Structures are given as structure tokens and as C-alpha cells.
Amino acid sequence: MFLGRGKELHALDKMYKSDKFEFVVIYGRRRVGKTALINQFIGDKKSIYFMGVESNEKQNLENFSKSIIEFSSGIQTETTFASFQAALEYVFKMAENERIILAMDEYPYVARSSKSLPSTLQLMIDKYKDTSNLMLILCGSSMSYMEDHVLAYKAPLYGRRTAQMKILPFDFEESCRYFCNMSDEDKALMYGIVGGTPQYLLQMSDKLSVEENIKNTYLNPMSFLYEEPVNLLKQEVREPAIYTAIITAIATGHTRMSEISSKVGENTNVCSNYIKNLMNLGIIKRETPYGEKESKKSIYAIEDNMFYFWYRFVLDNNSVIARGATDLVYKRIEPQLSNYMGRVFEEICTQYLWKLLLEGKTPIEFVSLGRWWGNDPIQRSQVELDIMGEQDSESALFAECKWRNEKVDLDILETLMKRSKLFRYMKVHYYLFSKSGFTKDCIEKAQGMENVTLVSYADILSSMK
């Protein structure tokens, strides 16, 4: 099942029809759907698809040769080109008379086994780019390798690409397409539980309840997702145990660098390097109060919902799960789901505001959105704002998001308005987001003001249709 990626497919089709040499770099973390995107794109076109393997140069060259010869002759053979240069030159020459796509998937595996391959590709591109109709696609899951050895200024291939695509997980709207048969609330829960990574979404069934899906995957020792975070870390990093300890610390509320360091038992310099790698993988993100670029208030959060759910609920229960006590573990998880969804709902609301901006429907044309936290000198306490966004020094929006079973009352709006006065904006607009709607008093107050918008979760879903 292939869903989404319309923008990426449109961009690739446009380049395909350009009738000139194109070189596209596609990269992104594992399971995000890069290979599916490539296969969807090349399905009805003349193309050579080759996937690198974590082996030596000889094995990769043999596999590459088979892919080329099978394309050109339709015959499977054991014939192998003498070198990658000879193989690539053959492909570039074939493409002088017709449009051909050469897709090299998991390129980092091949390039690591053949140190001269990047320079060879550079040579071939420079030699044939003006005469060849080849569309070259290099794809890789090793984010650091693709950024440092393909896209970076000092890389041999720098300046040769005509486009690059960083493939990200789906947002909430795109993820909902996988769960057509689920209730509206369950769609949000599923997004909170697995995030927007296609491979994880495919593990879930919209014909089952949230409880059944959790039990069939995270609480099932034979399931793909049961050990997925640990397996993924083993593929990406050298010391998965320390990375696991850091993610666990963050998932259990130790969000400042000093707290993480103390919990893990490593000094802050060591933790900082590990966290940087996790950020590059899209697993961890650093947050600072909105408007503060560098701040001692910085905290760290788990960006990927699948990792967040797994480290919050699965890791500590591993021994119980392994003994088959699925129902017991779910009973521990269920009462915490509403609180867990608070952060996820903020993410959904943020995506909704960005969509409004792109459609020209926001009263404040913000340039960025984020959380803010800091001191309220009047109340002499720490306070938070779920979302704020600034248009300029005089205009901003403030938002509060509530994933609760009860309706949002007037006091929530009044608190939001009071906290906004910690800033000195002349023009302010307020958004209240609620899972369950709003009380009569809250609605009447909002209707009497020109700068308040009430948005229910149902409204968010309606905007997606």
C-alpha cells in the first residue's frame, strides 16, 4: 500500500521530463519510505534499480553489474564489469539516446566498501552531464553519511546534484489516511502511538481497536515493533546501551542536560555528543523557550512518537511482556494515555496552525511556532504557553491545547490572556484547542471578542477533508 508523497512524486516527475541530466539525492532515516517512494516513481519508466548491501566491493559490483545487464539485455547473467567506473560509463552511454533512471539505493553501503566510488561518480558526471539523458538517484538511510559525504561542501559530489530530498515522517493529516475505519479520537491516539513513519503505520490495523493494536505490536514479543527502537539504534550507532539510557532518561522526565547527565551517570560533555547524534537521527529534539535562540533553559524531548511511546511504556515492562502478561501491562498503560496525548495534541494543533498560515487564513502571519516557559514575576511562579508565534515585534498569537474529556471552560481562556501579557505585543490573537469542545461561558466570551478563535478537535479533522 503506497500513500502520500504527492509533492515528492510531482517533483521527481518534473525532473524526469526535463530532457537533461538530473542528479537527485534522497535521504532520510530508516523506515521512512524512501525505497517505496523510488519504486513508486520508477514503476512505469525505463530504470535500473540497485540496492547496496553491507558487504565488500566485489559483492556490490557483481550485484550492480547484474542489474545493468538485466536491464539492457533482459537476461540474467553472472557477467561482471571490471570496475564501477566501467559499469557507470556503460550506463551513462546508454542514456545518451534515451531517458534512463539509475537508482542506487543504500548508497552509503556501496561507497564505504568502494572508497573511490564518489570520485568515480564525480568523473562520470562531469564527463557526460552535457550529453547524457540519465536521471541519477542516490538514496541513503545513513543521515550523517549522506550529509557529510554527498551533500557537504568538501564532498566529491558537491555541486553536481540538481535536487535533494530529505524524506520526513508523515504529519498527522497524512497519517490519518492509514486509519480510515477508525473513530476520530482513535486516529489521534494511533498517531501518538506510532507517529508518522510509514513502516510503523503499516504495523497497525484500522479494523482493530487501539487496545488491540497496542497488544498486537508493542506488547507482543514476536512483533516487529516490540524491539524496534533498540534494533534501529544498533544499526545506527556504536554504543546503543548509552543511547538507550539517554532516551529513557528523557522519556521519564529528565529533560535538562544536567538531569540527563546525572541519570545516565556520564558527564555533560559525553551526553552532549550522544544527544547530538540522536538529534541528527530525528529521535531527540532540543527545545528553548520561544524567542530565545540560546538559553540555559533548554530542554530535550523525544521527537519521534514511536520512540516516545516505547520508552515511556514498553521498556520498563519488558520482563512482564516477555512472560505473556499482555492484559496486565495494558492496564498499566491505559490510565496514562490521556496525559501522554497532551504533548501529541500540541503537535497536531501546531500542524493545524501551519496549514492555516499556508492557506492565508491566520490573523497573525507568524514566522515560527514554539512552546514558551519562564517566570511570571507577578505570580512568582514558572508558567508555560503551549504554542506562541510572532509575526513581528508588535504582533503575535498565543494558543492553549487541552486533550481532555471535559469541555474547556472560561478560566483557560482567561489564564491564556493573562500569560500573554508577560509580552508586550500591540496586536494579539488567541487560539484555544480542545478535544471535547467548549463551555457556554467560554463560547460567549470568545464571541464577544474579535481576537479569539476556538478550535475543537472535530474542526481540525474537518479541515483535512
Image: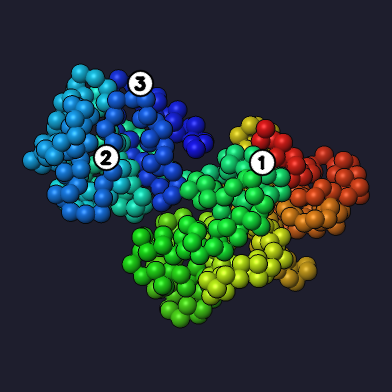
Q: Amino acid at mark 3?
A: Lys
CA distance for labels 2 and 1: 37 Å
Can you say whether 465 is above or below 326 in the image?
above
Q: Are marks 3 and 2 in contact (CB under 8 Å)?
A: no
The residue sitting at 51% across, 78% down in the picture is: 263
Residue that badge 2 annotates: 50
Residue that badge 1 annotates: 181
Q: Secondary structure at mark 2?
A: strand
Residue 135 x, y percent position in the rendering? 28, 29
Residue 339 x, y percent position in the rendering? 70, 62
CA distance for labels 1 and 3: 38 Å
Left or right of 417 on screen, residue 372: left
The residue sitting at 64% across, 45% down in the picture is: 207
Residue 426 x, y percent position in the rendering? 73, 46
Q: Secondary structure at mark 1?
A: loop
Left or right of 436 on screen, residue 123: left
Which of the two residues, 418 or 405, is positioned nearer the viewer here? 405
The residue sitting at 36% across, 60% down in the picture is: 236
Q: Residues within 10 Å of mark 2 (few under 14, many from 20)?
A: some
Residue that badge 3 annotates: 17
Q: Of circles 3 and 2, which is in front?
A: 2
Q: Residues within 10 Å of mark 1 (few under 14, many from 20)?
A: some
The residue sitting at 49% across, 32% down in the picture is: 6
Among numbered discs 2 and 1, the one appearing first in the sequence: 2
Q: Of circles 1 and 3, which is in front?
A: 1
Which of the two residues, 144 or 109, is positioned nearer the viewer here? 109
Residue 91 x, y percent position in the rendering? 18, 30
Residue 132 seen in the figure:
no
